[in-house]
Image: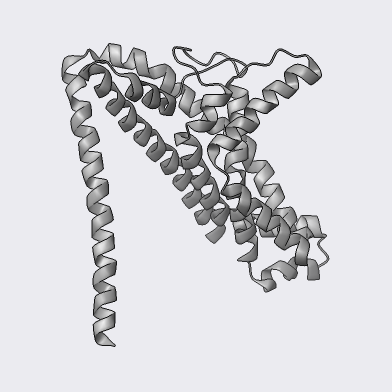
Amino acid sequence: MKVIKLLLGGYIWFCALSITVMIVAFLFFLIKNSIYPLLNIPISNILSELFPAIIGSIAVTLSSVAIASPVGIMTGIFINEYTNGRTRNRLVFIFKVMGGIPSIVIGIFGFIIILVVNRAIGYNLRPCLFVSSLSLALLILPYIVHSTVIAFRSISLKEKVIGLSLGVKKHQNIFYILFPKSLPALFSGIILAVGRAAVDTAVIMLTGVAAMAGMPSSLLKPYEALPFYIYLRSSEYRNINELSMVYIAAVIIIIICIGLLYVSNYIHKRILIRIKR
């Protein structure tokens, strides 16, 4: 028995160290290769080329999370508080299946929306920031729904019924008592959704991103994004400088993801502090 525990512990440490070494090596490789163009290309040229893609990535990420969050939270509350038995299990299963759908399928769905709008309504809708945001919102929706269901299930039965026993109506109990209690857990799903939306390429390729589109001047205009920039440049680079720009873009998108996650974690901690007070 001791031998098994020793082997299991050694395997756990081996896996942890292997993953850590791989991540550190990968980051070192990116940073090392992104330093070369900084020494040989003017910073102004780098910023002028990457800045529209940086703004586009932030815009499409924040807008998709802003669309998906209220819908996902309300859906999760409905599943947990207004359904039971088979209906609840079926809805949870549906959103689990949605969470496993490949992003390219969601991209095709967004493209179909464009075709339907053009043919049914007659409005000349083109691939744009709004369609990308809507499609990405559908992609990350299952994460937020699932985190909401888990957050409400984690609340104790005593906390759920204390308001009802004092004469509070069900919707008031949900939004004034249960919802604030579940906020810390809800942010776990939102943080995951931020990271998922920021790095996806397949969805935005079919719904709005374009090379050399410039700054996103409107929700109904094409835009640039760092994931697409990395894909495009790495597939058709002609010299070492262009390949080095890919490494810089990769480092920047990691920094953006870390920044967005840091902001989400900061809000998460502030909510915890207020709840404890």
Residue 84 in view, yes or no? no
- Which sits in the foreground, 61 or 9? 9
- Which sits in the foreground, 88 or 7? 7
x%, y% of residue 143? 57, 49
x%, y% of residue 134? 63, 31
Q: Is residue 61 placed above or below 3 in the rendered structure?
A: above
Q: Is residue 70 placed above or below 152 in the rendered structure?
A: above
Please give left or right for residue 272 compared with residue 124 in the image. left
Q: Residue at left 79%, top 59%?
A: 82
Residue that sits furthest to the bottom in the current view: 1
Please give left or right for residue 270 compared with residue 72 in the image. left
Quadrant assignment for the N terminus: bottom left
Please give left or right for residue 78 compared with residue 269 in the image. right
x%, y% of residue 86? 76, 65
**Residue 29, quarter of picture:** top left
**Residue 171, quarter of picture:** bottom right
Residue 114 in view, yes or no? yes
Q: Residue at left 77%, top 18%?
A: 119
Please give left or right for residue 190 compared with residue 51 in the image. right
Quadrant assignment for the C terminus: bottom right
**Residue 147, quarter of picture:** bottom right
x%, y% of residue 196? 49, 41
- Which sits in the foreground, 155 or 276? 155
Q: Residue at left 65%, top 51%?
A: 95
